[in-house]
Amino acid sequence: MLASDEAAARLWLDDAEALRRLAGEPLRRSRTERSGARVFTPERARGERELRALLARLREHPAVAWAEPVPTAAEREFAHSLSIALTGPPVDRIVFGPSEAELRAQAARGEPPPSELVRDLGRVARMPVYFERSVTGGAYALRLFHRVSPATAAGVAGRLAADPRIAWAEPAVRGRFQTVVDDPLLPAQWALLDPLAGIAAPEAWRLGGDAAQVTIAVLDSGVLGDHPDLAGRVLPGQDFVWDATRAGDLDGRDRDATDPGDHAVKYQCDDTSLPTASSWHGTHVAGIAAAAANGAGIVGVAPSARILPVRIGAACGIDPIDLAEAIRWAAGVGAPAAAPNPPPAGEQRTQQIATASRPPAAVPNPHPARVLNLSLSFPGPCPPWVEDAVAAAVRAGALLIAAAGNDGRSAAGTFPANCPGVLAVAASDATGGRAPYSNIGPVEIAAPGGSLALGPAGGIVSAMDTGRERAVRRDWGVKEGTSMAAPHVAGVAALVLAVAPDLRPGQLWNVLVESARAFPRGTAADCTDTGPASCGAGIVNAEAAVRAALTRRTGATTGES
């Protein structure tokens, strides 16, 4: 899994003696990454299982927010190759980080860059660009005057990154939700009940623990909060969709995270795109994680947990800048910037955008989430501005759980699953085997995502709406995908926090992964727990995870709370 020269791990800790005690040997510090993560290399080579055990010990240290292997050179190259694939969606924006500290500080305050810098960067890019907005964390987004192929955008970013005034530059490629396709009865929920392929949810419920004080943020298409299975459970959220032309609710960012529908009309997304129906994806995901046990339909994994809807998905997909700023807000770090509404036009476009892009008075999240569910993916490596947002959220005490992707290939080429500090989830089917679409290693754990190749009963049933474009009638429906797997893990995380609320993100990660059920053998597509085709450590096990958390609470294993 790890190249001999890259048997290293990222973590936040600079106490050499503490590292030596935890690892049982000295760890050599290799470098510090831009996000502040420190990279350490063991004195000797380790096998994959031994390295996994070492990282688990490191995550137990109070000063370690997270610890994980550093991607190999081959994995990084694979991710970059996906981000510039000729078949990818067209790109019309580049995000860059300034080299100068003062300019980074200006960006962090929401102030525009100097107009002469934008003009110079247009010459460097060899095509017209204009300033669109600042990006939380100290970066800027430039819009190209026309959409270009991912390969062309990668070339533009490369030219900008070579300029001494630019620390880094990356194309902003839109992502998508990780559902493959589109009753309300608990017996239909094999993912909770089946002894071979399920997660043992009822057994976990019987162990006690009320997750009513645990908040799961669902970063998605928005949530229909009046659905019978969700009513009264949904907190006030935030709409982070910046682009009013795609938002579907006639404005840009606002405080209404209700899903207005993410359908797209013909040619809206690019010159060849066809109409698409609304997915009601966020409502389906929220139901899997935390639908109420109220007799109305299904039951969520954590039926008393609170849902924080954070809308980032709209027509034509998900903006990676919206994603990063939504991650920060969901974890209680920072406040959203307002979007220009309506988008300015005409000769003063650049200046108007610069003025409109300044954030309003801070509107912080009054309900920071301990668990962030990201049932979505983008091709390529983790962009710097997303990596910084993840780091800020983890430091704030949140565990980020992401879908591994539905491309049937390595998850190393998909973000946010490949972002440092994110727990990546593969999908299993009703036999306990790997769902045929699921991405594979490097991932941490698997969970039921369903497979309609086994028939309608092989999918995951959850809350939906019947409307093709706008919401019409609340209902239940079946989907499959790693989008469905991630909220199963998020729900189990909430059950664990209900009985052990003091767990830090790294400890919560350990509980989930170390208590996972071994993959069954003899399925149509057996999973392994190591190697490049790994589905992770096993299938998430709610009962075992809650038992492990209860044991930790008594101090029987670690002596820590």
Image (cartoon, rainbow, N blue to C red):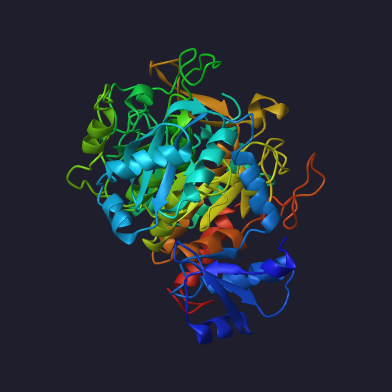
In the picture, the quarter occupied by the C terminus is bottom left
Q: Position of residue 272 (x, y in %)?
A: 56, 15
* In-front residue for pair 490/296: 490
| Residue 520 visible within the image | yes
Q: Which residue is situated farthest in the left direction here?
A: 361
Relative horizontal placement of residue 21, taking residue 503 as reference (left or right):
right
Q: How many marks?
A: 0
Rendered residue at 23%/42% (across/down): 358
* In-front residue for pair 528/340: 340
Residue 554 position (above or below residue 397): below
Rendered residue at 55%/40% (across/down): 154
* In-front residue for pair 289/12: 12
Relative horizontal placement of residue 371, taking residue 6 as reference (left or right):
left
Residue 467 position (above or below residue 51): above
Q: Position of residue 142 (x, y in %)?
A: 39, 38
Rendered residue at 39%/55% (across/down): 370
Q: Position of residue 132 (x, y in %)?
A: 33, 36
| Residue 305 visible within the image | no
* In-front residue for pair 281/108: 108
Relative horizontal placement of residue 117, taking residue 419 as reference (left or right):
left
Residue 136 position (above or below residue 156): below
In the picture, the quarter occupied by the N terminus is bottom right
Q: Position of residue 277 (x, y in %)?
A: 49, 17
